[in-house]
Amino acid sequence: MNFLAPLAFAFAATIPVVVVFYLLKRKRTVKLVPSTLLWQKFLAESQASAPFQKLRHNGLLILQILLLLLAVLALSRPFFAGQAPGSQLRIVILDASASMQATDVRPDRFSLAREAALRLVDALKPGEQMMVLLAGANTVVKQSPTSDKATLRRALQECAPSDSPTRIADALKTAAAFTFEKRGEEEVAAAEIHLFSDGAVPGLEQFENKGLPLVFHQVGTGANNLGITALEARSNPENPAQRALYTGVLNASSNSLSTELQLLFDGQLLDARAITVGPGETQPQVFVTSQARDGVFTVRLEVEDDLAVDNEASVVSVLPQPARVLLVTRGNRFLEKALGAVPSARLTVAADLADPGRGFDFVVLDLVAPTVWPEVNVLAFAVSPTNWFERVRPVENPALVDWKSTHPLLRYTPFDNVGVSRSTVVESPGWGTSLLDCPQGALMVAGELGRQRLAWVGFDPLESNWPLRVSFPIFIANAVEWLNPATARTSQLSVRSGDPFQLAFADPVPTARIRLPGGDTRDLDVDPAHSEIVFGDTARRGTYRVTAGTNEVAFCVNLLDARESNIQPRAELNLGQYDKVEANVERQANTELWRTLTLLGLAVLMFEWWWYHKRTA
Amino acid sequence: MSNALLNPDLLRRLEQLQLLAARRSKSSARGERRSRARGQSVEFADYRNYVAGDDFRYLDWNLYGRLERLFLKLYEEERELPVRLFLDASESMTFGEPPKFDFARQVAAALGYIALCGFDRVSVIPFPSAGGRLQNAEGAQSAIRHPPSAIHNALRSVRGRKSASQFFQSLAALTAGGAASLNQSLRRAAIESRQAGVAVVLSDLLDPEGYEAGLNTLVGRGFQVNVVHILSPEELAPTTFGDLRLVDAESGDSREVTFGKYRLKAYQQTVQNFCARLREFCQSRGIHYFLARSDMDLGELILKQLRRAEVVG
């Protein structure tokens, strides 16, 4: 046992004072009474006359000295040293993800987590430091290491949860940077990480665990939540004049939940339907509606559940514009027919390209290396002399071994019945991904180079049986959709909360103003070289409106994250593949005893009081 | 005079009362109480055969006419009832407002008057005998006229209503003081008295040696004992609090006491226990016990409590 304030033992000098008080003779009023017979029970504590005889068998004196001793001991603040060496730095990570707004505990998970963190601040001992990290979509260092409790409290009070998914791994990496320090050859953990979270944190399986000294404080109890986890607006495949909205509703609770799902267009109710979602299920829902103008579709769940953020999602729906396509070819009927069959494409055919493709949305190069390279999006068939790849090699009868059917270009386009007689192959470049592979290299590459979308196919379709397969017209249709800048732009208008929003303007604008869902506005300076804005403050869900010069653009920020909507609290965290941390495995360090001593002292005081009256009454 | 002790209205009402004796008088002197002795009165008791020398005046001639045998008619002899009033005149009786001793004298006067009116022989026995001094307030003249022994004699064996005035005067001249041993005083008085009768003990009974032995002796001698236990209001509910040094008025002992209002209840409980023990002791020995506050109405005690207990009637 050690003492934090050993100087307090000086107070022990008060003990003789108590003894002296007992030795002093009390001044008493003399009263003549008929008889002392009735007063025998009320005699004062001691009738002894010798000073030190008085002190013998005097229970009250002993009790009072004991009380004083306890008080002095409490003032000296004794403590038992903990088994673990006390960390000099505590790193508090507050999970600020959307699921922390859940109200299954009062007032909400985040407030509880913050209270627990504040208690940790109270328990901070002199000389110890603490830092505060807020882990939302991005990790923010709210407070660098300090031992000033007031500053720490203020930093914690300023923390607020966001509507974004969690990226705890980033926060842990940041914390790890502060945790380890080199002592000689080995790295020693000099800090302790306290994670305050509900445990609904994805993405830690890949976390490289280096034996982080992590203490997990878990909050949250229930998971009564319905959430919208997907939303997309597209043309109705059966009737291109209509819009189809694909949405998914997740039930994270263990009971079946029924509610009403509403569809709104620019705030006006279009449709409502009653749905029942089984426990743990995700139910897809499709709304089909006509759309007369550009606007924002909102899907809303009319339900009172623990998490409100995911009960509403919005998407900007822009009316589809026909893509203006320039086909540069020496003649390819299959390609012409396939492009002409796409309803949203307006085809122009040319033999060569004299300008960079102005007036077109994208250019299809069929075996032609143009005189002027287009600045718009490009689909190129067997065009070798480009600066897109480092090396282009010819191959004969390549075996098609793998293709990426998840890429939007290759959706519903199987290559298992396609044979190619001659082709060129490349190593997949840094700007794109390989979509079709043979053992020698990539036959098809798609990606974005600068602000240009490029799709490159290494072989002439006429040197394969591909045009005869059903996958060819589908690929062409996919390509028109993917290369159409309007599509790209539309996909840019839906952002997951926490992700940056990016928008390029056709004409240079000096500034842009963004109105946030709450009504606040932010002004941004636009880089004149790029005339593009990047906006990162997308922590709040809702519709944002950008005004830049004459341009007015709306974009929507949604949570749309099944892992966040599933607010079931986890008692343990998986760190990496093998390690896990259980909730509340706190290390016991330096237990101070003064509270116990004070309580004991109070008990002694009350006993003394009771005894004094019991003895004499 | 008597006015100092009893008011005329009370006196008038007392005249209608008399002491009730549960037992027949054993006194040798003639009086108005029934006794076991045969003698001259109007109360017929029995017959017996005539023996030579009997007074012819008591022969029943009617019987002789019928039976031709001589019978003598016997009558109950009426004797007097000795009433002894044991008056505690120790220092402790001077306490209280009004003083307990004043109240005790009033009770003694009232009971004595009842007895005098009933032609009973009344004796007041103050104790301690040496402490029964003359009241200084009464002045030096009375001390000259009535030396202490004279007063004590005047209070002994008083009989007849005409002695009442003298009896009251002597009582009024008594004063309390000194230490007394209740047990010793009662025992000595019990042994000295030749005939048993009614005994009334007027005292606060606050004697460290106790009261049991004295009362036992009185009962043993055949007295019909009544105890009037007199306590002052201050003794029942003290009004002085704080750190006190209590000095015993009789023994001079001092005790240190810390007494607060919160302990008043405990003190009252002590007094109640003391009285309850006394009452229990008396009940087990056929003694009438009366608890009296020194500020209570005398009429209430005599006319109600003693009457209810059939001590007077």
Image (cartoon, coloured by chain):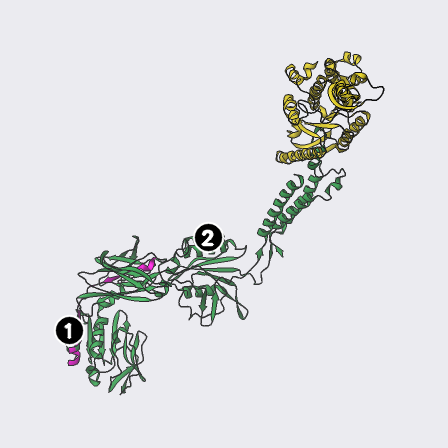
Quadrant location of residue B282? Answer: top right
Q: Residues within 10 Å of mark 1 (few under 14, many from 20)?
A: some
Q: Residues within 10 Å of mark 2 (few under 14, many from 20)?
A: some
Judge whether residue B251 can be spotted in this image: no
Chain identity of mark 1: A
Residue located farthest toward the right when viewing the structure as drawn: B52
Whichever of callouts 1 and 2 sits on the residue coming sooner in the sequence is 2
Quadrant for the N terminus of chain A in the image: bottom right
Quarter of the image where one finds residue A45: top right
Chain A: give its colour. green
Residue A126 vs residue A231, the one in the foreground:
A231
Residue A268 locus on image (x, y percent): 22, 56
Looking at the image, residue A376 lies above or below residue B32: below
Provide residue A370's location: percent of width, then percent of height: 19, 77
Segment colored magenta = A308-337
Chain corresponding to yellow in the figure: B
Label 2 sits on a secondary structure element that is helix
The one nearer the camera, B224 or A276, is B224
Q: Amino acid at mark 2?
A: Arg
In the picture of the structure, the residue carrying the numbered disc 1 is A347
Which residue in the structure is indicated by mark 2?
A: A153
Residue at mark 1 to residue at mark 2: CA–CA distance: 65 Å
